Every structure is written in structure tokens, then in C-alpha cells.
Image (spheres, rainbow, N blue to C red):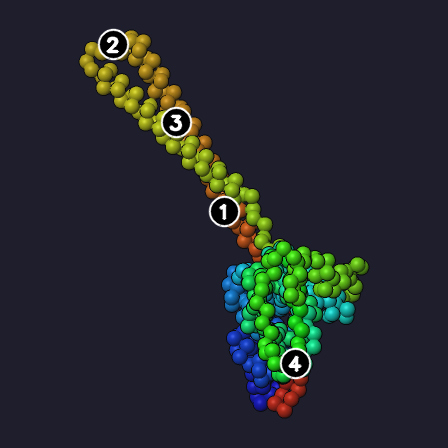
Amino acid sequence: MTAPRVLPIAAALVAVLWSPAAFADRIADAPPEREEADAATIFAEGRQRYDEGRFEQALVAFRRVLDVAPSPNARLYVGRSLRRLGRLAEAYNELRRAAQDANRRAATEPRYQVTRESAREEAATLVGSVAFVSLVVTGAPPGAEVMIDGQRTGPALWTQPLARMPARARIEARAEGMQPITIEVDLRAATETRVRIPFAPVSLEGAVQMGFANDSSSTRAQGVETVAVDRQALDASMGERSTRAPDASRPIAPPPAPAQPASSAWVPVGGVAVGLGVASTVTGVVFAVLGNQRFGELSARCNQPGSMCHLDPAVQSRVNEGRTFDLVAAVNIAAGVTTAVAGAGMVLGGVLQNEANRSAAAVMAPVMVRVVPTATFGRDGLELGARGSF
């Protein structure tokens, strides 16, 4: 191979092995196949941040992936990151959309069935903690805007309940040539508040201001209705549940890992053992001190010239007592040290097992990244790259 041909190949290899940050910086100018590979790299970065508990950074990474490739798995982890950050309403909306996206793609890519079910189940756990608001918009002309607490909602969101945090919400509707509408409602957890937004042309009466809260004895008040959440309807909106086994000929992502990896029981058991061992050792030390006191007293008394201690029954009793203290001290110290050492071993083994569980949880997450190497011949020689899907 000639030198001019070696240089392009070496340059291509360097590009493939470049750092993740370098990949991320080049997404905007990359061709579609390179964009997929770069998105997979950033997705892996986000997973690492998520597993490390750095959820803010993970959220940024997963949203960058969505800017390049609309991956249901990336959106699933956007929802998970938001949930870990305590932004439950946003998490629910993202998890529901992840389930809907995965449901559409599962028709041709069965591996997304796992993503759909994971997103659906995780969203269901949030229903009792968030409120829902449904907008019944009528007479809306093109370009009409409806905002909830200043957040714009498009027509695509008017057809499904939107998760919000339980609080007082301000709904505003604007459109050119139409009366502006302002409505304030109290949103409660595990309830759905349906708000009617009737657009009407501007009249002499001016803007429509409906400032009220839906906390009256009646569930209906001026176009607002509050009802219990229909969990079945919410679940159905995320796609049909799997009723058959996935196609074994297609790659399927592994089952989702639990939100919190199981902790080893050896850690608390070992802690108790260490505590008992220390207590036993302390007890042995106390008896050893008492035994030394007994023998010290006898030594001072019986080492005098002409002492008859060997004939004194009280002295013999004290000697026997001192020997008993020494025996108890030796047994307790030996048992205490042995138990403490064994307990420390249990704690260490449990910590190592917990680390293994966390590593296994990362491997078992419901995401599969496939990267396929590519090779093409260009003007400058052989170009190596990779294409990925996740």
C-alpha cells in the first residue's frame, strides 16, 4: 500500500476513535449516517451520567440525542431523568410520549415493545402524584395559541390530558381577531380538569375573563369540569399492550432494570456482627481488668514475710474468682475479635455485591444500541465510519 493511501485510512481510524466530546461538537455538520453514530455516542454518555446519579447532565445529553435522532429509548431516559430530578409532571409527559413513539415503531421493530412497556409502567406510577388538564378548544383559527402558566401548547396537545403539578394554573388563549380568554383553575393530584376554550370573534364586550377556581360544590362551573383520572384511558393512549411473544428473529432489548438495584442483606447482618464483636471484646477487657485487680490485691497481701495466705480459705476464694475473671475475659475477647472480623468480612462482601448489582442494572436497562461499522471509498481513499440505532 502506498503512503498516500495509508494516510487517509489512518485519519479515518483516528476519527472513529475520537473522544465523545469531539463527536458531539460535529453533529451539526455531519451527514445522516454519521449523525446516527454520533447520537449513539452521546446516548452512551448520557447513560453513564445517569448511572452515576448525575441526572441534570444526563438530561442534557438525552435531549441532545433527541435533537438528532427521535429515539424512543432516548425519550424514555429523558423521562427517567426528569423523574429523578423531582419534575414529575414533565416526566409523565415524556414517558407517555416515549411509549407512544415506541408503540409506533414496534410494528416494524419488535425490540421497541420493551421500551413501550417500560415507559407505560413507569408513567403509571406517577398518575397519583400529578394533576391532568384537558383543553376542549373550539373555534380556534389557524395560529391560535393556548398557554398554561406561560407554556405554549400546540393543537397536537389539545387532544390528550396534559400532566401538571398540582397547583393553581392560569390558562390563556389568544388568536388574531378573537377575544382573549383567561381562565384560572385549581389542579389537584390524581384528577383531570377539563377546561373549555371557546374562541369567539372580538365584540364590543371586549375580552373574556373567567377568573374562577374549580373548588365549588359543583363539579361543573363555567366550562370547567373536574373528574377522577381515568387510568385505563391514560394507559390506552400509550398504545396496545403486547399480547403475543415478540418475533425471535429480531433483536429484542433486555428487560428493564429496577429503579433501585437490590441491596445485599450481608451489609446489615455484617454491621450487627461487628457491633456484637466489639461489645464482646469490651466485656472481655472489663473482666481482664477485674481479674488483674484481684491478683494485684493478693500479691500485695501474700508476698509479705511470714504470710500464711496458702492456708486462708478467703484468699483461695479470691484466687479462684480471679481465675474465673481471666477465663471469662479470654473467651469474650476471642469471641469478640472473631465475630468482629467475620462481620467486617460480611460488610465488605455486601458492598462488593451491591456494586455488582449496580453494574448488572446498567447492563440490564431496556435499551439496546447497535453500531454497525461502515467502509466506503472516496476521493481520498478508504473512509471508515459507523452507523447505529438505539
Residue that carries the numbered disc 2 in the rendered image: 308
Give the residue drawn at x 68%, y 81%. Answer: 141
Vertical placement of residue 338 versus 18, above or below: above
Q: Position of residue 98 (x, y in %)?
A: 66, 67
Task: Looking at the image, tell me whether mark 1 or mark 4 is earlier in sequence order.
Answer: 4
From the viewer's perspective, is the residue at label 3 or at label 4 nearer?
Answer: 4
Please name the amino acid that badge 2 sits on.
Answer: Met
Residue that carries the numbered disc 1 in the rendered image: 348
Which residue occupies the foreground of this view, 376 or 142? 142
Q: Secondary structure at mark 1?
A: helix
From the viewer's perspective, is the residue at label 2 or at label 1 nearer?
Answer: 1
Badge number at residue 201? 4
CB contact under 8 Å: marks 1 and 4: no
Q: Position of residue 151 (x, y in %)?
A: 57, 72
Give the residue drawn at x 53%, y 79%. Answer: 25
Cα gap from disc 3 to disc 4, whole angstroms:
95 Å
Cα gap from disc 1 to disc 4, whole angstroms:
73 Å
Q: Position of residue 169 (x, y in %)?
A: 56, 65
Q: Secondary structure at mark 3?
A: helix
From the viewer's perspective, is the residue at label 1 or at label 4 nearer?
Answer: 4
Residue that carries the numbered disc 3 in the rendered image: 329
Vertical placement of residue 318 versus 22, above or below: above
Task: Looking at the image, tell me whether mark 3 or mark 4 is earlier in sequence order.
Answer: 4
Q: Secondary structure at mark 4?
A: loop
Task: Looking at the image, tell me whether mark 1 or mark 3 is earlier in sequence order.
Answer: 3
Give the residue drawn at x 22%, y 11%. Answer: 307
